Image: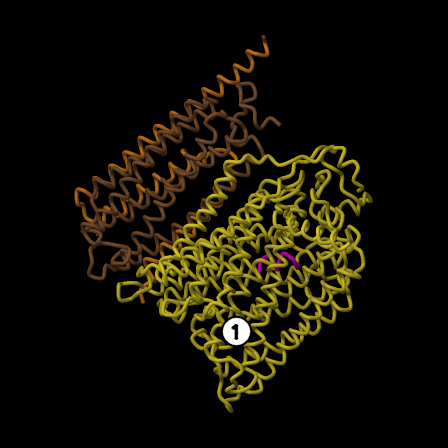
Chain colours: A brown, B yellow, C orange
Amino acid sequence: MSHDHSLNPKTMPEDPAKATMEGKHKFLGLWFFLGGETVLFACFFGTYLALRNSTAGGPTSQDLFGLDLVFLMTVLLLTSSLTSVYAMYHMKNNDFKKMMLWLGITALLGFGFLALEIYEFAHYISDYGFTFRSSAFGSAFYTLVGFHGGHVVFGLSWLIALMVRNAKRGLNLYNAPKFNTFALYWHFIDVVWVFIFTVVYLMGMVS
Amino acid sequence: MSNAATQKRALSAVLWDYLTTVDHKKVGILYLIGGGFFFLLGGLEALIIRIQLIKPENDFISAGLYNEMITMHGTTMIFLAATPLLFGLMNYIMPLQIGARDVAFPFLNALGFWLFFSGGILLNCSWFLGGAPDAGWTAYAPLSIQSPGHGTDFYVMGLQLSGAGTLMSGINFLVTIVSMRAPGMTYMRMPLFTWTTFVTSVLTLFAFPALTVGLFLLMFDRMFGSAFFDVALGGNSVIWQHLFWIFGHPEVYILILPAFGVFSEILPTFSKKRLFGYSAMVFATFLIAFLGFMVWAHHMFTVGLGPVANSIFAVATMAIAVPTGIKIFNWLFTMWGGSIVINSAMLWALAFIPSFTIGGMTGVMLGSNVADYQYHDSYFVVAHFHYVIVGGVVFALLAACHYWWPKMFGRILHEGMGKLAFWTFFIGFHLTFFIQHFLGLMGMPRRYWVFLENQGLDTGNLISTIGAFFMTFGTLVFLVNIVYTAIKGEKAPADPWDARTLEWTIASPPAFYNFKQLPLVRGLDPLWIEKTEGNGKMTPAEPLDEIHMPNGSILPLIMTVGFFTASFGFIYQTDHKAWLIAVYAGMALAIGCMVIRSLKDDHGFHISKEELEREAD
Amino acid sequence: MTENTSTNKINSFQKEKNKDEMRKQIITFALMIFFTMIAFFAVGMGISSMFVIPLILILAIVQVGFQFYYFMHMKDKGHEFPALLIFGGIWVTFLVGVTFVTIIWW
């Protein structure tokens, strides 16, 4: 079948990610999954909102959070969202090399974000003694932000597996949907982060 | 080389086939076998509960074991019996009804089944490993936090596994219905069972994540020392109740909507009339699903949420009676003036209408937040939810079994035994649960191990237990019927009921590719349209061509073994850190399988045109 | 020869369309960064919480709308069901959010 052959301008469909039945299914399936993920994070957010003042005498959100680090993390993740848009742009133009380049940049930005998050957690634990077990606030904070971090880890592993596997194959109708679903997932991670920095960090520093 | 050796080989080939299958029909049958097994297990637990309550101050089982029984009965019946049995039916029937050759993600489908099954096995392992969960099927914190031993840990991990499986199936069904309908099968031509599958899947998608989160919080509290429900560190146990019921209430609609779908198939078929008010039925299904998401706090009226919150949830709850009423009347009008055939499947459907209506009416009573302070945690509640779940879901499952058995297994269930099973089960059901309304109103609380003499509860409980034995007898007759049918049952033609929808246009049981050529659908009840126009069979929508099918795979099973091992590790790492090895090893196995699945190209295979031509119609 | 040019034409049209799309997405991105900066500034300046909390929430919602509609193409054709289910999820999120800030404490 035409699956395995690299695409050339003549066989290039308008949107290679959705040209096959499998591609369409992956596209719909991931979107629907994101609908479920929305509720998953809603429940973590709800729990956090209910427990954010339950510090049990331990450090409060005002004691802990700092604007600079969170701003840096936000910029990294937002930019990685844009770079993955660039990657999909080049996929539609059938420019495999450029797509891989932009995906590589996306991965680097993701790793940067992850490093900062690990640094942040380590900072809270060593400098404030603020852990998962300190208080209900601690449990809720680490669970919400940690689950988001876990999604980043999963996304990065996914991305690297895709890039390594397809490095020598070029773009075809079999792997284009895979890149596209990854990109959608990655945007969703960013969506969740927008609410985390707003609800957890910014609101935590205000009130 | 004897005959026995060939037979043995054939048996292992069949076993291997089922272990690696990704065919929606085989996965559906696996769901039915798994769910059926847990249904019997849950039924046995129910019988033990009723024997304990046969007389005042009975000591048939100890108080601790009784708590384990009620917890496991509820958990098993909801998560491991009703849900998977319905998902099995959806798996088997829905793709046939829309004229598809498989579901959208066959691999995920198999994985979903194995996850559900391993979750159920894990949960039941607890019986042999120091005691089952005993905090009630709702596992309210702080009781579930305090519960000693590993019982509740098994609850957490078992439900987490099976919940993940259910969520996958939900997404799978959604994509299948959205993108794999046969040519001409517009949304408003889909059979009602497919519609309810769709809406149920939407509910699954939005409800199960709440359970996932709740179980994670409980897991972290029990196993890793977090403080979500620990009041001393600022935790709040009401969070569990909200999360559980944000999941739990939609879950009852996940159960009942497919049941509505089943009856909406059976009643038109055996009344020889098209479903009355088709579009109203579809609309009512959506309305029930929508409202069903906004009523969860009616389980929590006595928590003390305040009069405003209670009133809002009470009004929303009562509003659900409207779309449900629409459905009841539509079924009645479907039968009105039809030429009705009464057989086993139809009997279950007919019995469902009054039984479920009783359950619905007590539901409205319970929905009144003021009155609920009286009913709460009494046997009135027990009677109510058994009327809707047994009278609705179990009746639907049995009706569906009789209706679709010929399609699934190629043989028709024995009518005489079917009727015997129906009458004993039906009478037993009302004997068991009708009296419980009054036991509840007289003040008998649910979940109590014993009751005292001379409080007016003796006779009622005795009658209730006798009813339970009737139901057991009915179930046994049904099992005998299955065995008898497998051996001597009458062979079924493609369309034994003179039915209306697409699944009856193909052989019983269908070929593994379902449709040799996709059918052209020209309206609601496509087969019926062709019959009335004298064609008798569907017009193909495509020329005969090779068919693309997915490859089987053992990976779903291995992946599940990985998660299963890791779950054991999580449960026991609180005793000894060496168990963390099981966590890592299990996760490595599962993730390894995911990597293999992701990296290995799997294009499936093609059935050639010649091969298809050789096959008889 | 003629056939060749016609495919090229389609391609260049396609390319132009993609480029146009990309331009919109960069504008979207610039706006998102801008909104983020406003939110962080507003909090950093210490404006009263009565004003700043609604402000940052609205900014977050607008940003997320950009992500969904532009970066994830929910504005395009063929996204009816994704949109339906995302809005379903958002509706449940709303219910959960309201619940957990109002009736969790007895």
Tell me if residue B89 comes above or below residue B390 in the rendering: above
The C terminus of chain B: image quadrant: top right
Number of marks in picture = 1
Judging from the image, what secondary structure is the residue with disc 1 in?
Answer: helix
Residue at image mark 1 = B382
- In the picture as drawn, the residue positioned furthest to the right comes out as B534
Counting from the top left corner in percent of width and height, residue B456 is at 53, 88
Numbered range of the magenta stretch:
B256-263
- Image quadrant in which you'd find residue B355: bottom right
**Residue at x-position 60% and y-position 80%:** B465
Could you say which is closer to the camera, residue B86 or residue A151?
A151
- In the displayed structure, does residue A140 sit left or right of residue B321? left
- Image quadrant in which you'd find residue A79: top left
Could you say which is closer to the camera, residue B77 or residue A28?
B77
Callout 1 environment at 10 Å: few (<14), some (14 to 19), or many (20+)? some
Counting from the top left corner in percent of width and height, residue B352 is at 65, 66
Subunit ID for the residue under disc 1: B
- In the displayed structure, does residue B607 sit left or right of residue A149? right
The kind of residue on which mark 1 rests is Val
In magenta segment, residue C8: no
Counting from the top left corner in percent of width and height, residue B282 is at 60, 52
- In the displayed structure, does residue C95 sit left or right of residue B386? left
Counting from the top left corner in percent of width and height, residue B436 is at 55, 78
**Residue at x-position 74% and y-position 71%:** B420
- In the picture as drawn, the residue positioned furthest to the bottom comes out as B454
Overall secondary structure of the magenta section: helix
- In the picture as drawn, the residue positioned furthest to the top comes out as C1
